[in-house]
Structures are given as C-alpha cells and as structure tokens.
Image (cartoon, rainbow, N blue to C red):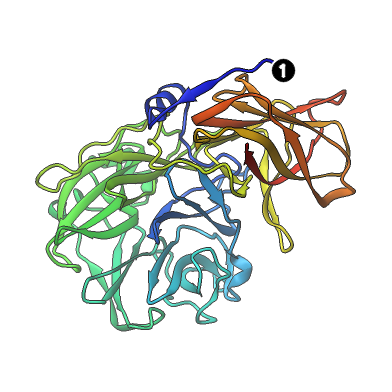
C-alpha cells in the first residue's frame, strides 16, 4: 500500500469542516424535536422528543438524550424515559426539559393523561442520562386543561426554582426545594402587545388567527426561561403569518412584568410549521437550539435538532439568527486512542441507533454507501499502527472502511466483516494501518458490501479505537 503523509495542524479543521460539510440537523439517526440543552461537568446534553416517522400529527411516545463535549460530535444515550415510565400517561409525549440540582436530575415532561387532558410530570435520576423514574407516581401539574404543555425550569442564584409552561396562555409556579412540589397557586402571566408582541383573542384557534388576525407576534407555546447578567429572558414560539417564529421578552424579575423584545428566528426555510428552542452558554459561547424538518422524509411532523452560535448585542439583546446548513464549529478534538462509541457522530447516513440492556446504545441498520462521520479527530504526531472495532453480524459480506476527511478520502483501514455468531454476538475485529497519518482530521466509517444487494443490512457497530505506533 502506498504511504501518504497527511498532516493538518492546530484548529485549521474549523474552517475546513464548516465550509465543506453540513452539520445541521445535528442528529440524523432519528427525529429529535423540541431540543432542551443542559450543561453539566463540561458536557452539553440535549433532551428531545421523538417524532414517529410517517404520521401527520405529533405522535410521540418517548424522550431521548444526547451529549457532546465539542458541540459537533453527539453521543446517543438512547431512551431513558417514555410514556410507559408514567402510569398516568397515555399519549403525546411532547416537549420536556431536564435540570440539575444538588446532584439530582429532574426531567419535567408533559403528556396526555388517562383523563384525556395534558399534564406535567417529573422524573428523577442520579445521572443526566438516567435511568429516570417517575418522582411522584402522578402529575405535578394537572388542571384538566390542554394548556399544560412545554415545561421550562430555571433555578435562580438564591436557589428558588421556577416552572413555566403554556399553550396560548403562560403559567408559572415556584417549585419547593424538593423540585417535585410547588407552593401557592398556579399563576398566569398577563399578555399584551407590550409584553409578548400580541394578544390572542379568547376562543380563537390558531387556524382562525392565521386567516383573520393581523398581529406583530403572539405567544403560542414552547417557553424557555433563563437568566443572563441579572436579566431574565423568556424565549417562546410565537406566531406571525402561517408559521411559528422564535421570539423573546425580558424582565428584571423572574415573575415579570415582561417586555417584548422581538423575534430571534423568523421567516426561515425550516420546512416545519412549529419551532421550539433553547438558549444556553457553553465554554464561553452562546448557542441557539431549535428544530427543523429538513431530514429526508421529514417535515412539520418529523423534526430534528439544529444549532447556531450567536453573540449577544452589547445591551444584552439577542440578534436575529439565520439558520445554516454548516452549524457550529468544534470546541475540542476527539482522542482516537481510547474507546469511542460508534453512536458518537457528527453526521450519518443509511444507519440507525438501537439499544439493549447488555450493550446499551449501538449503531444498526447499516446499508451499502452509508457512513458515520466523526469530526476533529486528533491523531497527534506519533503515528497509527492499527484500528479496532466491536462488531456483530448474523451474515457476512459487510465491509467497514475507515477513511480520512471524506467518504472517498484516503483509506486507512478496511475490515471485511465475518459472521460473528449473530446480530447480538459481538467480536473485536482488527486491521493494520500502513498509511502515515498525523494531525486533526474528520474520520469517516464507510459501509460497503461484497456481493450483496444494497438494501441488505450489513452489521451492527458498537465502538472503535486506533492504536499508536
């Protein structure tokens, strides 16, 4: 094999990757609507819903979580909670948010109840990725209303936690120290043109509003509550024209009065009627999380998480943010010489993820010409001698190629996958590397086949690593 020395030094990878490759939406193996970001111990977590493909409504039965140390490679942690986790829930596993307090993680969800209304519940865990369990065995917020959706939680510097939620109307309670009960009565935030850009007329449906009403903005759903530099922010899904936008208001108090500040993201080609987002700072940068319907077969009922970096204006206001295909730059590099999960990826095609109790999450349904891309892998200067992968296959004929910087880039290694004894029987397969490689590269795991049809499943893929010379 011809030796080719390939070197990219420093973080030149930022300009290389973002000018050539798409990054949004950041998860491609399944739909991931209503992203709720959370930072914990130098890692970003996204808690999302899970649109079921092929339906014309928001039919969702589970919630998912992913994490990243660099904002571009996201590790799939599977489904820590679902409707089955809540004895009182029956349907519509809609938007949710997780927060951490005193070493516990509280995941506030909403769902349709057995009484045919919407309610807000809370699950608790000792880990940000679970396992979670219903903290109460009953809803936290239940009023017999369909307005009890899209909870958002913020814990102030004094330790007081606030739970906001709403659908057309905006409500809040002060949570007690236990984070699973609240004091006093449920309060509704008054809305006006001055506070939220518009006023929804009582009894008017969204459809009627779209056809008959003319307004600058109006609160619809999806509140996101946070604080920055002593100022409180309430981002929400507003409505102008026939689609939702992301708008925001600010206050000097956690309970208002609120002052409308304008739209953050509007008139963008998201291919989705709804939008739902979160704003958060991570490693000195500010990010907007939102969703689009731009994956193949997606749309308003198949939405996926996307991310944009932005900078606040000097007065603390949020600029207009435009969606991009490129997304954000990596904040760190990946160490190839340790175990890396196959479900950690920046982009993928023709594969899915699955999980079981024995293995956890792994990559499955791999097909010919599919691939996984991992961004910003730092090989250093010592050189590479071998590649290892944990793979399971009930049939042979699958091929795993390891390439640099593109699906047709320099091939570092190739593994012809044998039958391992079953689709859940895992073996570590190895390949020697004779190419000389150093520096930072994107790594592509390309799926190919030998004398098989393109639609046949190839193998399951759990984790990988390289070995230094």
Q: Quadrant of the C terminus?
A: top right
> Looking at the picture, does residue 283 appear above or below residue 443?
below
Q: Position of residue 275 (x, y in %)?
A: 39, 44
- Residue 81 located left or right of residue 180: right
Q: Return the residue nearer the eye: 239 or 413.
A: 413
Dividing the picture into quadrants, the one containing residue 163 is: bottom left
Residue extending farthest to the left is 315
| Between 114 and 287, the one nearer to me in the picture | 287
- Quarter of the image where one finds residue 419: top right
The secondary element bearing badge 1 is classed as loop
Image height of 333 relative to 415, above or below: below
Q: How many marks?
A: 1
In this view, the residue in front, 251 or 188, is: 251
Q: Is residue 215 visible?
A: no
Q: Quadrant of residue 409?
A: top right
Q: Residue 232: in sight, yes or no?
A: yes
Q: Quadrant of the N terminus?
A: top right
Spot occupied by residue 390 in the image (x, y as percentages of width and height): 73, 46
Q: Nearer the viewer, residue 425 or 464?
A: 464
Q: Position of residue 108 (x, y in %)?
A: 44, 68
Most extreme residue toward the top, as rendered?
A: 2
> Disc 1 marks which residue?
1
Vertical order, 250 against 262 (above or below): below
On screen, residue 362 versus residue 115, left or right, reads: right
Q: Is residue 431 left or right of residue 175?
A: right
**Badge 1, how many Cα within 10 Å: few under 14, some, many 20+?**
few
């Amino acid at each position: 094999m011809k030796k080719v020395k390939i070197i990219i030094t420093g973080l030149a990878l930022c300009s290389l990757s973002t000018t050539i490759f798409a990054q949004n939406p950041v998860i491609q193996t399944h739909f991931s609507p209503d992203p709720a970001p959370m930072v914990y111990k130098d890692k970003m977590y996204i808690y999302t819903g899970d649109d079921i493909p092929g339906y014309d409504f928001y039919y969702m039965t589970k919630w998912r979580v992913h994490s990243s140390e660099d904002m571009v490679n996201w590790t799939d942690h599977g489904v820590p909670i679902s409707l089955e986790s809540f004895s009182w829930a029956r349907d519509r596993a809609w938007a949710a948010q997780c927060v951490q307090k005193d070493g516990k993680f509280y995941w506030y969800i909403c769902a349709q109840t057995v009484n045919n209304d919407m309610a807000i519940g809370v699950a608790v865990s000792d880990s940000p990725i679970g396992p979670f369990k219903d903290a109460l065995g009953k809803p936290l917020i239940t009023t017999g209303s369909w307005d009890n959706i899209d909870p958002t939680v913020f814990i102030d510097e004094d330790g007081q936690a606030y739970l906001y939620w709403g659908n057309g109307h905006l409500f809040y309670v002060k949570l007690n120290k236990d984070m699973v009960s609240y004091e006093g009565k449920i309060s509704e935030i008054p809305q006006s043109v001055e506070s939220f850009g518009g006023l929804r007329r009582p009894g008017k449906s969204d459809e009627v509003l779209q056809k008959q009403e003319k307004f600058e903005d109006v609160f619809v759903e999806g509140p996101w509550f946070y604080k920055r530099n002593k100022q409180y922010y309430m981002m929400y899904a507003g409505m102008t024209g026939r689609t939702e936008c992301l708008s925001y208001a600010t206050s000097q108090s956690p309970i208002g009065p609120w002052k409308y500040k304008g739209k953050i993201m509007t008139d963008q080609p998201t291919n989705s009627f709804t939008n739902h987002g979160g704003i958060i700072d991570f490693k000195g940068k500010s990010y907007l999380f939102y969703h689009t319907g731009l994956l193949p077969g997606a749309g308003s009922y198949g939405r996926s998480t996307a991310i944009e970096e932005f900078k606040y204006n000097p007065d603390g206001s949020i600029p207009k943010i435009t969606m991009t295909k490129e997304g954000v730059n990596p904040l760190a590099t990946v160490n190839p010489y340790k175990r890396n999960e196959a479900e950690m990826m920046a982009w993928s095609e023709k594969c899915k993820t699955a999980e079981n109790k024995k293995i956890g999450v792994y990559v499955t349904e791999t097909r010919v010409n599919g691939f996984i891309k991992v961004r910003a892998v730092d090989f250093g200067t010592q050189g590479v001698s071998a590649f290892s992968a944990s793979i399971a296959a009930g049939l042979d004929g699958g091929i795993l190629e390891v390439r640099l910087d593109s699906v047709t880039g320099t091939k570092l290694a190739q593994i012809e996958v044998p039958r391992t004894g079953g689709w859940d029987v895992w073996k570590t397969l190895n390949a020697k590397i004779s190419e000389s490689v150093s520096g930072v590269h994107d790594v592509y795991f390309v799926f190919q086949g030998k004398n098989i049809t393109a639609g046949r499943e190839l193998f399951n893929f759990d984790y990988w690593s390289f070995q230094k010379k």
